Image (cartoon, grey):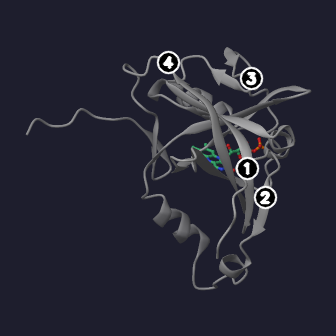
């Protein structure tokens, strides 16, 4: 299946990936599925936005870069997210790529129905999307596509602004087998 990505406007193109997701296989146990994909280590991000009610955001593991030219990134978000529809309505989002000392913020932004911004200092991108203090690297993006995929939506953003803070000192926050991890120094060969 080919999905056309509209990189020229802020109106998301929407495509439903029905061929791949409409037939749920009874042979794949969800717990086993989560266990297997949990072997794939990743970093952690907080996806943020700002609407008329203030700053919004949620913790997101499923971020990855898609294309260099044009510069595109993507993440998957649960259809039950209360944050993402508000971000979609603004047409843009920021990606905060977290450092090892931001695990508390990661937990905080994964708790629905709480004040996720309590004690958080941030500054806005040009679009007004929050970058958390001490975030080592960040991107601001315009939403250019959204694909329906099972119980998630796949969102694609075109990068419009990016930056880094303290990037040479901060180790990344990692996630592996359901737990936060940090880098260990490589053994000397
Ligand atoms: C380590 C970690 C990674 C997560 N990754 C994702 C993700 O990739 N996509 C997603 O939709 N939710 C992810 N979540 C869950 C959301 O952060 C959480 O459900 C959040 O509260 C979204 O719901 P809300 O928008 O209603 O607040 C993750 C949570 C944690 C702790």
Residue 63 appears anywhere in the view? yes
Q: Residue at x 42, y 58 (%)?
A: 39
Query: Which residue carries the number 3 mark?
Result: 117
3 or 2: mark nearer the eye: 2
**What label does residue 165 carry, if any?**
4
- Mark 4–mark 1 Cα distance, whole angstroms, equals 27 Å
Marks 2,4: beta carbons within 8 A = no
Nearer-N-terminus badge (2/4): 2
At a point 68% along the width and 67% down the height, the residue shown is: 3
How many neighbours does mark 3 have within 10 angstroms: few (below 14), some (14-19), or many (20 or more)?
Answer: some
Residue at 84% across / 46% down in the picture? 85
Among numbered discs 3 and 2, the one appearing first in the sequence: 2
Question: Quick check: 161 above or below 120?
Answer: below
- The circle on residue 13 is 2
Question: Which numbered disc, 3 or 1, marks the residue that appears first in the sequence?
Answer: 3
- CB of mark 1 within 8 Å of CB of mark 2? yes
Can you give x and y, in whole percent of width and height, for residue 150 in the image? 72, 69
Tell me if the residue at label 2 has its CB under 8 Å from ligand 1: no
Which marked residue is nearer to the observer: mark 4 or mark 1? 1
């Amino acid at each position: 299946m080919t999905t056309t990505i509209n990189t020229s406007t802020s109106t998301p193109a929407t495509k439903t990936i029905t061929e791949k997701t409409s037939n749920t296989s009874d042979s794949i146990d969800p717990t086993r599925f989560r266990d297997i994909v949990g072997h794939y280590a990743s970093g952690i991000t907080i996806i943020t936005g700002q609407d008329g009610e203030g700053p919004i955001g949620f913790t997101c593991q499923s971020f990855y870069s898609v294309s260099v030219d044009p510069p595109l990134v993507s993440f998957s978000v649960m259809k039950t997210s209360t944050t993402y529809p508000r971000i979609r309505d603004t047409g843009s989002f920021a990606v905060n790529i977290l450092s090892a000392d931001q695990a508390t913020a990661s937990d905080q932004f994964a708790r629905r129905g709480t004040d996720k911004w309590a004690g958080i200092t941030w500054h806005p991108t040009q679009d007004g999307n929050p970058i958390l203090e001490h975030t080592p690297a960040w991107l601001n993006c315009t939403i250019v596509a959204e694909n329906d995929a099972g119980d998630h939506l796949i969102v694609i953003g075109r990068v419009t602004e990016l930056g880094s803070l303290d990037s040479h000192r901060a180790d990344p926050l990692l996630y592996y087998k359901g737990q936060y991890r940090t880098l260990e120094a490589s053994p000397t060969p």
